[in-house]
């Protein structure tokens, strides 16, 4: 009997990885537990063990292969003396085909963006060309089963003609921290597994090597404690970046985030500020269920004295994290694990800092305003693409900063479109969408042609089962339906 | 040098003597706190001070003894029974009183009140309304000291009631792990609001509470300012020499209720009376000064001066204006 060795998933969100090398050769005898290969993702390197006894009769994916999808057969183990048929099941992945596809997507993208660029922005075509040139010179984006986050429109805060580089949000966040640590010796990183382990999600990769253990500090599992230590250090004039392995664990520490970090400037009559960044992945990852999948956007956004940022792409993540580290206030910086591996264009500027509190029009339009942030932008932008095919021109706003919220950009858009849908993965009651709807009805009531609708996570704890999890989260279809509803179209 | 979780009885024969100058300093500083707190109690009764107001009367020797051992630049952090710590840190009595009264001349412009007060200038880092919060925040201040290598020590106070909060042990662990220069001072006044220690704590020797983290601890008579000073000297030297944290349990007593609104029915009047008569930290110093030949007159002068400072503080606080309404919106963000 033959057994297929499948490409393993190393984390809940892993979709593909690199088969780094084989430690056994075809024909080698193996027994259960033997390490036969090494797998790499951008987050980790792991060993693959044989699950059965036999002979490694065939290696289907050679060492060094990139982008091997999870569950692809990578080898065959057979009982000794057994013949192995070269069935389709065992066929190596068509790497060339995948790359080709990715390349085609990359080539198609700039022209598609060119078409959607508004006519009154003469610079837009130039920018699209610059992008095309850069994309041709950089490796094709990795193919994944989930559509890549569309690249953000080049924002006005980036000078025309700036070279753009492709990078993941994970790399952008790391670069932001490294750049700020080089610039200011009072900046340091503290949290669980940030140093030796290189970050639970590899966001702090390489920081220990560059900055040493004094500035990249591993903590025990002690969120309440190290949040408080960070606050004390910030009171005394340092600039801590406190990483929560996920924001779910920040509930242990919320007392220091709210009572100590957010309120002390006020309580001290302006004497003691708290320049600290609390950052880490927020919201649902994949299949990690209720206690590891909560969105804290609304929680922290409610607190005066905090700044809350939640970026949707690598460029915003970099520019805003740098701004957050420089800011003299406590900043809650909500990342998203699913977005960590997504690649987008980041300006290759020496010091790229974005303004806090400014939303970004990710896609201009005139028929309906879609407002979202973080991973919600994935639904919003994909929905806008679909709506475009049906002749509906949606304007998509990426809030980027949740507090202070850029109400003016939302209102200006709604005055133009008369219709608004807010999208988030968080729960509906007292959510970010609820806040947006309130502000819109208050400041643009006379411009509204329909009630504001929202698309949110469902009002339940996050279920584990794959089908229920999918139901609990917003979908592109939900956004399309809501957008049509406010347009009174079916 | 360090007695791990050793108990030093009140009558320990090895009490290091104070010079007359030190006795006078202790007397003056403790008396100022006593008179200030008495006045704060009066002003509370008159409605000048509102909300919660936690008086330090009876515990003066703890902060004054530690202050006498500290060096300029060492930082103080405590929870909300904090008026004594502010005065000991050198903060101006009139501005502390104005803050208690919610007036614009207060340290926090009237926006913090009795429980939430700070002074960057005096290295006083609060004044925290969450009783266990000083432990990690004080450890964080010590982290900054270690990070800069500036030789400062963070002096971090909290009560025995706060010692039952988990964050205290999270802070102990990190402070010991990273050898942070922080002295944790547990002010054991025996009552966490209305709960006597034996009803709340499985281990009532609070100096042993750091043992699991190998933090040296010492239980001392916190009513004797000489013992507090000597122990703090030892603890601060320990920290300054890079050995990590040190834990002092200062056994003390508060004469008043937990806050102004506490009738303190959980203990007998006799118990309070006995502490006042036999262990009062200020009376102990007074007796030694008299025995040393200092005249009653001189001590009365010191008292009169304390009363004068406090009366002026009260006048200032009473006369001062409330904050301008526009202050509602200031200092939310830097």
Image: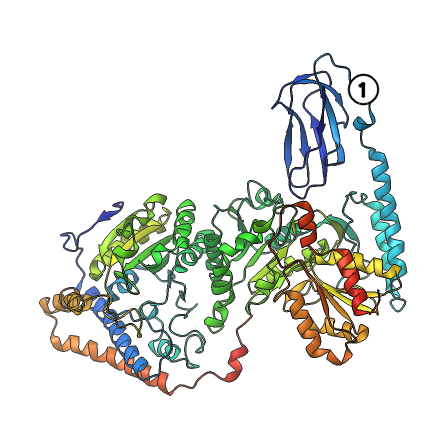
Task: Name the quadrant containing residue A406.
Answer: bottom right
- Which residue position is annotated with label 1? A85
A419 horizontally vs A24: left or right: right
Residue B292 appears at what percent x and percent y?
10, 66
Q: Pick whichever, B226 or B255, lies toward us.
A: B255
Position of A350 relative to A143 (above/below): below
Residue A458 appears at what percent x and percent y?
65, 58
Identify the residue at the far top of this view.
A81
Here the colouring is rainbow
Identify the residue at the far bottom of this view.
B319
Residue B210 appears at what percent x and percent y?
33, 48
Task: Name the quadrant containing residue A445.
Answer: bottom right
Residue A325: tell me if it is visible. no
Image quadrant holding the N terminus of chain B, namely: top left
Kindly state the secondary structure of the residue where label 1 is placed: loop
Residue B58 appears at what percent x and percent y?
23, 67
**Neighbourhood count class around disc 1 (C-alpha, 10 Å): few under 14, some 14–19, many 20 upward:** few
Count of marks, rendered view: 1
A33 horizontally vs A470: left or right: left
Kindly identify the residue that appears in the image at 32 percent across and 49 percent down: B209
Kindly identify the residue that appears in the image at 42 percent across and 56 percent down: B136
B316 horizontally vs A98: left or right: left
Kindly identify the residue that appears in the image at 89 percent across and 66 percent down: A122
Image quadrant holding the C terminus of chain B, namely: bottom right
């Amino acid at each position: 009997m033959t057994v297929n060795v499948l490409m393993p998933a190393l984390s809940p969100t892993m979709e593909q990885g690199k088969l780094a090398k084989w430690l056994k050769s075809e024909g080698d005898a193996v027994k259960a537990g033997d390490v036969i290969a090494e797998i790499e993702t951008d987050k980790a390197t792991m060993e693959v063990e044989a699950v059965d006894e036999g002979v490694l009769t065939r290696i289907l994916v050679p060492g060094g292969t990139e982008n091997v999808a999870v569950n692809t057969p990578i080898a065959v183990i057979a009982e000794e003396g057994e013949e192995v048929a070269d069935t389709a099941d065992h066929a190596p992945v068509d790497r060339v085909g995948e790359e080709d596809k990715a390349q085609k997507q990359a080539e198609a993208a700039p022209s598609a963006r060119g078409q959607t660029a508004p006519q009154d922005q003469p610079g837009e075509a130039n920018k699209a060309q610059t992008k095309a040139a850069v994309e041709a010179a950089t490796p094709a984006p990795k193919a994944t089963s989930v559509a890549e986050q569309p690249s953000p429109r080049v924002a006005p805060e980036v000078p025309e003609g700036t070279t753009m580089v492709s990078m993941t949000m994970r790399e952008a966040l790391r670069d932001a921290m490294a750049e700020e640590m080089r610039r200011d010796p009072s900046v340091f990183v503290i949290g669980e597994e940030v140093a030796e382990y290189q970050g639970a999600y590899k966001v702090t990769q390489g920081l220990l090597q560059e900055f040493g253990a004094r500035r990249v500090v591993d903590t025990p599992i002690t969120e309440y404690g190290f949040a408080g230590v960070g606050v004390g250090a910030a009171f005394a004039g340092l600039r801590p970046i406190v990483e929560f392995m996920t924001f779910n664990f920040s509930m242990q520490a919320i007392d220091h985030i709210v009572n100590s970090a957010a309120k002390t400037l006020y309580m001290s009559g302006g004497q003691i500020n708290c320049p600290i960044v609390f950052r880490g992945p927020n919201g649902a990852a994949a299949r990690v269920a209720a206690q590891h999948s909560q969105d804290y956007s609304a929680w922290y956004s409610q607190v005066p004295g905090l700044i809350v940022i939640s970026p949707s792409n690598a460029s915003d993540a970099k520019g805003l994290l740098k701004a957050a580290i420089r800011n003299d206030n406590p900043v809650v910086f909500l990342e998203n694990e699913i977005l960590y591996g997504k690649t987008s264009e980041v300006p290759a500027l020496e010091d790229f800092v974005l303004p806090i509190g400014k939303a970004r029009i990710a896609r201009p339009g005139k028929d309906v305003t879609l407002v979202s942030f973080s991973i919600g932008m994935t639904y919003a932008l994909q929905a806008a693409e679909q709506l475009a095919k049906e002749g509906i021109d949606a304007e998509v706003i990426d809030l980027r900063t949740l507090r202070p919220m850029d109400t003016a950009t939302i209102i200006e858009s709604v005055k133009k479109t008369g219709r608004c849908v807010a999208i988030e993965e968080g729960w509906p009651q007292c959510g970010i969408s609820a806040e947006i709807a309130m502000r819109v009805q208050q400041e643009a009531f006379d411009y509204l042609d329909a009630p504001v609708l929202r698309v949110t996570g469902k009002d339940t704890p996050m279920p584990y089962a794959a089908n229920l999890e999918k139901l609990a989260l917003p979908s592109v279809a939900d956004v399309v339906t809501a957008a049509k509803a406010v347009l009174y179209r079916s | 040098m360090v007695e791990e979780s050793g108990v030093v009885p009140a009558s320990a024969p090895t009490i290091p003597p104070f010079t007359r100058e030190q006795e006078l300093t202790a007397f003056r500083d403790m008396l100022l706190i006593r008179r200030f707190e008495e006045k704060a109690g009066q002003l509370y009764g008159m409605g000048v001070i509102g909300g919660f107001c936690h008086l330090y009367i009876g515990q003066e020797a703890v902060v004054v003894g530690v202050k006498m051992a500290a060096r300029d630049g060492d930082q103080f952090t405590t929870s909300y029974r904090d008026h004594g710590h502010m005065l000991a840190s050198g903060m101006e009595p009139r501005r502390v009183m104005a803050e208690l009264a919610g007036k614009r001349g207060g340290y926090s412009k009237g926006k913090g009140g009795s429980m939430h007060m700070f002074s960057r200038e005096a290295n006083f880092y609060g004044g925290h309304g969450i009783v266990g919060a000083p432990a990690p925040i004080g450890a964080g201040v010590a982290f900054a000291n270690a990070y800069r290598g500036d030789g400062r020590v963070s002096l971090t106070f909290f009560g025995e009631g706060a010692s039952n909060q988990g964050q205290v042990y999270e802070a102990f662990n990190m402070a010991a792990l990273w050898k942070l220069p922080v002295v944790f001072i547990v002010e054991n006044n025996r009552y966490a609001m209305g709960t006597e220690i034996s009803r709340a704590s499985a281990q009532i020797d609070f100096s042993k509470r750091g043992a699991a983290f190998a933090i040296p601890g010492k239980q001392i008579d916190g009513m004797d300012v000489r013992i507090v000073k000597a122990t703090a000297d030892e603890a601060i030297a320990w920290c300054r020499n890079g050995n990590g944290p040190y834990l002092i349990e200062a056994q003390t007593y508060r004469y008043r209720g937990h806050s102004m609104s506490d009738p303190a029915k959980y203990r007998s009047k006799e118990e309070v009376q006995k502490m006042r008569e036999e262990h009062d930290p200020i009376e102990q110093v007074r007796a030694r000064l008299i025995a040393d030949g200092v005249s009653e007159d001189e001590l009365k002068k010191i008292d009169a001066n304390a009363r004068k400072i406090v009366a002026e503080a009260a006048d200032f606080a009473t006369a001062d204006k409330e904050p301008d309404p526009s202050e509602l919106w200031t200092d939310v963000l830097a």
